[in-house]
Amino acid sequence: MVFIEVIGHAAAALAFAFLTGFVIMRRRKLARTLSRNATIAYRAILIVSSTVALIHAYYAVDSILFGNALSPSDPLYVALHSPALIALSIVLLFLVSVKLVAERSPRPRRILAIGAHPDDLEIACGATLAKLRDAGHDVYAVVLTCGEAGGDPATRLYEAHHGASFLDVNGVEVLNFNDTALAEQVNEITRAIESRIRDYKPDIIPTHSAHDQHQDHLAVHQATLRAARNHSAILCYESPSVTRDFQPTFFVDVDGYLDVKIESIRTHADQRGKPYVSPERVRGIAVFRGGQAKTRYAEGFEVVRALASALGDI
Ligand SMILES: [Zn+2]
């Protein structure tokens, strides 16, 4: 009888965990707020779960071996459950107290980020895009391929949307150019980007760098420069395939957004095995660029051109 009660408690705890997880995943802002301090949050949740598990184990052993069945009115029952309730309250307080980091911008800009493959934007400038969104800027993303050469195209298409949604970008469009063969389609890609520039009227266009050894990245860089020939702010982000000639001179301070970036990269589960998606590598690059920019964490960009009024206050 007592054993059944313990099972009931465990089932209720599991249901609560699933419900909380569901709410968090459904509410992007909350998910990102949580992931902004993911390491601390995971530890807090782990401590709560362990406390609850230990209490229930003690309760079960005590009942089964010694026949000391407890009832909810028993002071011992209350004493055993209070630590779990206190810990749970601390976790909830923590979740409520975490604030958005970015300050609202008085001059919202429009950003059109262009990437070759489904995970390029998250890996190269995910923290910047998330921070810009939180500051009230409009961010649109265009991805030129479904990444069929590097994984299952349907999965990668879904993950491109999932990653963009996690970063809270206003819209993402995944086009169907041939993965690894973008260099043969530069004219068509240029026309596709031109039409998106007409639609979105961006102030700032982040894209791949000229100093990148991936042929697709290079093709997207060239096509973007041609399509955005009349645009005043073009910034080139840092993909894992950039060469040693990549020399950023424009930096975005991403302190408070590194966990968001790491979580957004995790949404691309199809690419999980790649060494450059490891949190350690992502953190290392942010620390290095932060060191160059004399701040804690940064993402670096090469500047094709940057008119001050187009950049606004980003
Ligand atoms: Zn790529």
Image (tube, grey):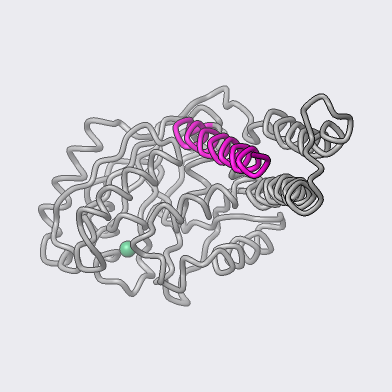
> Residue 135 at x, y = what percent?
55, 30
> Residue 138 at x, y = what percent?
42, 30
Residue at left offset 36%, top offset 70%: 212
Residue at left offset 25%, top offset 50%: 157
Judge by depth and name the residue closer to the eye, 161 or 89: 89
Query: Which image quarter holds the N terminus?
Result: top right
Judge by depth and name the residue closer to the eye, 175 or 312: 175
- Is residue 216 visible in the rendered structure shown here? yes
Q: Does residue 39 lie above or below 271 as drawn?
A: above
Residue at left offset 60%, top offset 60%: 286
- Is residue 31 visible in the rendered structure shown here? no
- Judge from the rendering whether residue 8 lies leftward or rightward of residue 269; answer left or right: right
Dominant secondary structure (helix, strand or loop) of the stretch shown in magenta? helix
- Judge from the rendering whether residue 134 lies leftward or rightward of residue 111; answer left or right: right
Q: Which residues are magenta?
A: 1-29
Kindly indicate the quadrant of the structure image that contains residue 2. Answer: top right
- Residue 16, magenta (yes or no): yes
Residue at left offset 60%, top offset 41%: 4
